[in-house]
Image: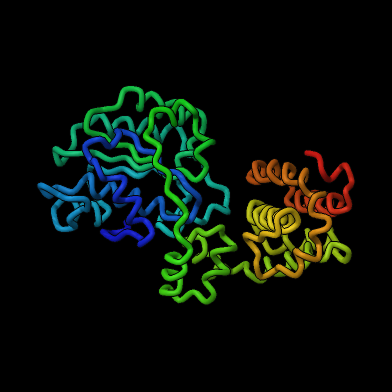
Amino acid sequence: MTGAVLYPWLEKSWAQLVRSPDTLSHALLLTGAPGIGKRCIAEYLAQYLLCEMHGKRGTPCGQCDGCRWYLSGNHPDFRLLAPDEQSESEGDESKTRRKTPPIKVEAIRELAEFVNLTAHRRGAKVVLLDPAESMNANAANAFLKMLEEPPAGVTFILVSHHWRRLLPTVRSRCRVFPISTPDPRVASQWLGEQGVVNPVLHLAHTGGAPLAALDDANAEWLPQRTLFLDHIANPAGMNVLSVAAELEKAKLDTELVVDWLQKWVHDLIGVGLAGRIRYYPDRRDDLVRLQPRAVNLLGYIDRLRDSRRLANHPLNQRLVFESLLFAYLEALHGKAHGVKNG
């Protein structure tokens, strides 16, 4: 549990969320990019709802029996629903690289028993789902029935990194509350306090998400990313088969490598069409050198998007890398095969 502390960039969102606590929906959907603190604010809200202090004003007291039970991780009226293999702490929100096991229908059925029982503390009951889009189809449909006839006194808090993957009928029964990417100055200051060297660069690498930037600064795969970017920045000398073999040998997740490539292509197109670099400002010279070919990559974006959706499927990883890199080279040279979906 995160305890009674919010990350500094979440304070404004929290104030908006509890401005009128009586109007909080029975189902709240927190959306936004991975690594910005959605899980933190969800846990803080759960504690707030379970807090038993009379006349509480905007924050959980941290001292009552309800808060103590929650902070100990043993509150009888709280349930966390998350994929079985997902280690859940706030920082893990940004670690979406490994395949996320689905939340299955059996877990929803067990949840139904919980929500229909009388609260042990005779107060609120709270259910937190994170990430909500990890429910498989059967689980999502079972959960929808729960939302259609919500038990009295139960609040569902859904955290979603990719809310469009949720069933539209589930989304429509929730109050959607987007969490914004924080101001870079606030995020940089916080990262500096965590001992991160060059926080601005790591924020750029992660699209401005401070928790993801903290992971980025401490990632074991940083040398592999540097080497990979060296390869794709010099397409004339790239040996696709060798690079694909290196990536496979490093046991990198397919989605992680596709993410690096997506960000590279985004920057290459951005510098070519508008002179802007978002993710790799430290690679400006390489991007500017390749920018005359940037327009050729517009169709390749679709290829990458499709590959990202299939990243968790049981495909031959080396063949996926080879296919993407050959298509990248072809796209740079304006060949038709590289600018279509396959």
The reply to whether residue 261 is in sight is no
Outermost residue to the left: 54
The reply to whether residue 81 is in sight is yes
The spot of residue 136 in percent (x, y) is: 51, 34
- Rendered residue at 38%/59% (across/down): 9
Q: In this view, does 64 lie above or below 165?
A: below
Q: In which quarter of the image is the C terminus?
A: top right
Q: Which of 43 and 253 is in front in this view?
A: 43
The spot of residue 51 in percent (x, y) is: 18, 48
As drawn, is 69 to the left or to the right of 248? left
- Residue 268 sits in quarter: bottom right
- Rendered residue at 80%/50% (across/down): 295
Q: Nearer the viewer, residue 268 or 327?
A: 268
Q: In this view, does 144 lie above or below 322?
A: above
Count of numbered circles on the image: 0
The spot of residue 151 in percent (x, y) is: 26, 27
- Residue 205 sits in quarter: bottom right
As drawn, is 245 to the left or to the right of 140? right
As drawn, is 193 to the left or to the right of 54? right
Q: Which of 207 and 117 is in front in this view?
A: 207
- Residue 150 sits in quarter: top left
Q: Nearer the viewer, residue 222 or 183?
A: 183
